[in-house]
Image (cartoon, rainbow, N blue to C red):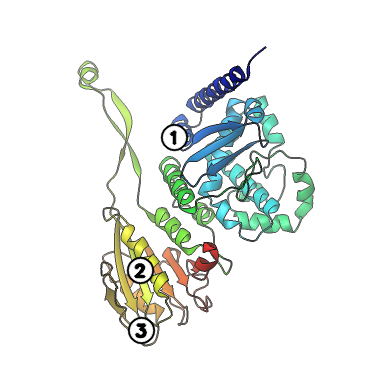
Amino acid sequence: MKTENEGVSTTRELDGLRKEALYDCVDRFDYGSELAKRVYHLGELRFTDAGSTAWIRVDPNEKVAFWFNRSFFDSLSDDELAFVLFHEVLHVAFRHHARRQDRDPKLWNLAGDLVCNAWLLERVGFRSVRTKRFGSFLSSAVTFENIRLVPPRDHLDVTAEHVYDLLEGGAVGCLRAAGSLVPCDQHTWDDAADGTEVRQDDAALEDFRGKVEKLLEEWMPGWSEDPVGDQRAVGTADSRPVNWAVLLRSRLIAVSRHTIEQRWAPGSRKIAWMYPRLLFPGDREIEMPCTSILIALDSSGSIRPDVLDRLLAIARSLPEDRFEVEAVSFDTQVYPLDLRARRPKLLGGGGTSFQAIEDFARTRRRYPDMVVVLTDGYASRPRVLRPDRWLWLLTERGTAEQVTGIGRRAWISALVSSAR
């Protein structure tokens, strides 16, 4: 008969074997083993007998962990394990945890699962897995094939918000169909699978999301340029509460310039001497121009000092080797603003013209990669060259009437509610 200590030792040993099994799985992943291994190393693997499937938890100490129920883990094949691992990080990349807002949790989780699994099948390559075992797994998974909400051509063209609206309407009996399907994971935005309260660290979670997005940009061509991917990763900020600082950081990550170029070159000197015409593939990072950010502050007096301080702190924290940040204040004209000053002075105070910002942006060496406007929104609608690059931070009692449809927007008042 085993002692209690022997039982603990055996559990630890088995968990160690599970970690090795998952690494072997991603190492053999047929559709990008290097990408799968990089995903594997994003967090620590943890195992438990609580819960029923898998989940991600980011603790206040900034430790990111992939949690698996032991029985669930042991029931999965190699392809299924890789699928679940990718599924978890896509939820974070798409910011499903932050975009739920006041929506029904079960419906929102279902919508997020459908979006993630569509990307895994079509973009990562799981559609090409032809084994009978994986086919059986997909037959009971949360996919658009099993919940027929949109035509196949639209599987990658819908956002989680759109899918949620369709689910809420109960289109074509989809809710009944979903009841018989098996999800890949448990969504623990509020509580852990073992019933304990989760105190997610927003900054740590956003930092983790940045790492995930950088990895996907590197290994999935077009990730950051794809307007559908960008919309899912960031979401559309509207009148619902949104943490504007998190949204701003998300946009900064999204526009940060980074690319990898494949090249062919001779191998080591010994190999080159023996086989002078033999070339080997390799990757190298290309030097890109700094990402240019234009920050425009409305000088009409509607900006609270604490909001200004936080925005300027974010701007000052950007590494100078990656970002060119220019700040201005504006009324009907644009005025220079010293970001490094202890208390920058906002010049202006007359009327308000958003068109003045656009006219100024067009005079720069190149049009800014991102235009951030802090304002109450009371001005005429501008005609801008690149509306997709604009982010509006709207103050309390402001209006979005004149800027709707131009880039994205968030309400500064959300800062107060999110801090409680």
Residue 220 placement, left or right of 160:
left
x and y, in percent, of residue 337 in the image: 28, 73
Quadrant where the N terminus is found in the figure: top right
The amino acid type found where label 3 is placed reads Thr
Report the residue marked by disc 1.
38
Can residue 333 be spotted in the picture?
A: yes
Report the residue marked by disc 3.
332
Q: Residue at x 44, y 51 (%)?
A: 224
Nearest to viewer (mark 2 / mark 3): 2
Find the distance from the CA under tag 1 to the CA under tag 2. 34 Å
Q: Is residue 311 above or below residue 58?
A: below
How crowded is the residue under tag 3: few (<14 C-alpha within 10 Å), some, or many (20+)? some
The amino acid type found where label 1 is placed reads Arg
Image-quadrant location for residue 140: top right
Query: Element at badge 2?
Result: strand
Q: Earlier in the sequence, mark 3 or mark 1?
A: 1
> Which of these two is toward me, 33 or 71?
71
x and y, in percent, of residue 170 in the image: 76, 55
Report the residue marked by disc 2.
295
Q: Earlier in the sequence, mark 2 or mark 3?
A: 2
The amino acid type found where label 2 is placed reads Ile
